[in-house]
Image: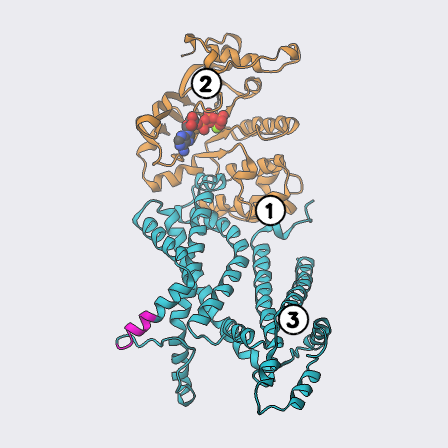
Chain colours: A orange, B cyan
Amino acid sequence: MALLEIDSLELEFGKGEDLVRAVDGVSLSIEEGETVCLVGESGSGKSVTALSIARLVPTPPARYPGGEILLEGKDVLKMSKRELRAIRGGVVSYVFQEPSAALNPVYRVGNQIMESLKLHRPKKANKNEVIRLLKLVGIPAPEARIRDYPHQMSGGMQQRVMIAMALASEPKLLIADEPTTALDVTIQAQILELLKELKERLSMSILFITHNLGIVGEIADRLHVMYRGKIVEAASAEEVLDKPKHPYTRALLECVPSLDKDVDRLAMIPEPEARGPEWD
Amino acid sequence: MWVFLIRRMLNTIPILLGVSLVTFFLMSMAPGGYLDTLSQNPQVSPETIARLKAQYNLDKPWYVQYFAWLKSAVRLDFGYSVQYQIAVTDLIGGRVWNTFVLSACAFVLAWLVAVPLGILAAVKRGSFVDRGSSVVAFAGLSIPEVLSALLALMFAAATKDSLGLPIGGAQSSLYDFMSPGDQFIDRVKHLILPVLVLASVEMAAIMRQMRSNLLDTLNAEYVTAARARGGGEFTVIVKHAVRTAINPLLTLLGYSLARLLSGAFIVENVMAWPGLGRLTMEAFFAKDYYLVVTTVVMAAGLLVVGNFIADVLLAWSDPRIRMEGKRS
Ligand SMILES: Nc1ncnc2c1ncn2[C@@H]1O[C@H](COP(=O)(O)OP(=O)(O)OP(=O)(O)O)[C@@H](O)[C@H]1O
Ligand SMILES: [Mg+2]
């Protein structure tokens, strides 16, 4: 049994004229220990798909007209509040795009990590465990940092704190929604390296969301390409990167800056008006 | 933090100096003075007038008067009320206290009611509570205090037999003959309506603000993150959303005090509450210079102290402000 199995998931916002089908029949599965990438342009529905896994999209305004999300065999869409609280953190943890927004500015980082420990591993809810977690994610001098407020840390350090917080509950699946997009390029590489290392050490599954195909090859076992709420391409990472089928994937691939390509000819994804019928 | 406090405290001095200077200047521009009125009185001899004039520097230009007043004011001697014939300091104490009691009660009531109501309205957005409270708040904001004070007096008069609420004033005529317990009850009874009137506008303003702040923070990513960690809805809302929604409210606390104080001036005058506002008006019409300047400075002082408390609270509540300039 797969750890996560999303089957023909549908998610809508609004009604009548304003109806938006943000997720339109998405199927996706993740095995234990596997890293799956979800790639797609802005607004294609990656975040709402990811948030749905722990039922974090508020309903209303959202609706789930169809599909199911099986997490360890149980449908998340049918879970009670109590069951949901247990899987949030307990089975799935999240790392978000903007660490400065995802950390509460008025609490010390130690306090926020402790919150996760108290909820899921109360026996380990102590300072030593917080320090161990901060060490695990490569924060120097964790004993001192524990009393820092988020605004006293750099973006890269904040993201490490977010990762420590996500790991505190020892989840089986880590969902990282564009965890490096808001960071400097060098820091991006460090965070990516950290995630790769943690994945080996803790044998977690990872759902990695990005719109940069350039980093996919480094981390992903499998790759799903999302376009306008649908999965338009799903295969092993090498396969997709070598022989992209969908025009959107090809366009995405051409966007990846690399050393052996002329930077002047850096491709652009065509505007929606300029996209041919083969896109849909 | 200490540097912040001291710097903030020193800042208040020029404000108070400026306020007193401007008031003095404006009073000197107004034609006539209390002694002109007094000199119409045939029982007061011209010699007495001359003596009083010399004693209180009233024959000198306004800036000389100002500096003389300022010199004694730093020793908490605010001059003499020519109208009441006693030292301003003795006159003003009880009045400041009355205004303080009125504003403080209104303030506490407003915040105690408005903050939970604002939270409820935001959390149950679009519900009956939300809509109902927004209608009431709209009414509270749009009825001026003069009108609601008058309405309150009419209400007290109409329900005199059933509720027995006093129609204006701060104590009954028999106050001095009451036991301490009854005196307290009498004071509270007199406070009820003025406090309600004064608190109503404030309540509405704070409630709306709390509601909109909380609607913002409920959508903040750290709230989603807290929920994603498996926190209960109550913890998520109170610990994460409400806690941060309070910060911008504290910035408004200073304005809140300013509004209360100006509201108190109106309420005091309409409802015969013997506070600073009423005293200022009386002194102003009687051209009792030193009294006017002192009451205005006192009012400014209350404001400044209020703003100072607001700043301290905000710094205490928001680490980003507390640590300003200390960033590594
Ligand atoms: N609260 C909401 N109300 C209405 N529509 C929404 C809401 N949240 C998301 N959507 C819609 O769902 C679609 C998918 O949004 P989503 O945030 O999942 O995109 P994304 O792929 O994560 O994009 P990005 O790369 O910018 O993060 C968007 O078109 C958006 O308009
Ligand atoms: Mg997104």
Residue A98 vertical position relative to residue B24 in the rendered view, above or below: above
List x then y, in percent, for residue B23.
63, 68
Relative height, residue B37 to residue B242 (above, below) = below
Report the amino acid beneath label 2: His
Based on the picture, tell me whether residue B113 belongs to the magenta stretch.
no
Q: Secondary structure at mark 2?
A: strand
**Quadrant where the N terminus of chain B is found in the figure:** bottom right
C-beta proximity under 8 Å, tags 1 and 3:
no
Distance from Cα at disc 1 to Cα at disc 3: 54 Å
- 2 or 1: tag closer to the N-terminus: 1
Give ligand 1's quarter of the image. top left
Q: Which residue is mark 1?
A: A149
Q: Which residue is mark 2?
A: A224
| B73 vs B241, nearest the viewer | B73
Q: Is residue A231 above or below residue B162?
A: above
Residue numbers of the magenta segment: B154-161
- Left or right: A272 in relation to B81: left
**Mark 1: which secondary structure?**
loop
Residue type marked 3: Ser
The answer to which of B231 and B245 lies nearer the viewer is B245
User: The disc numbered 1 marks a residue on which chain?
Assistant: A
Image coordinates for residue A94, horizontal then vertical, percent = 48, 34
- Give the quarter of the image for residue A136: top right
Q: Nearer the viewer, residue B289 or A155?
A: B289
Which residue sits at x=63%, y=67%? B26
| Residue A53 makes an appearance in the image | no
User: Residue B114: image x %, image y %?
Assistant: 41, 57
Tally of marks: 3
Judging from the image, mark 3 belongs to the subunit labelled B
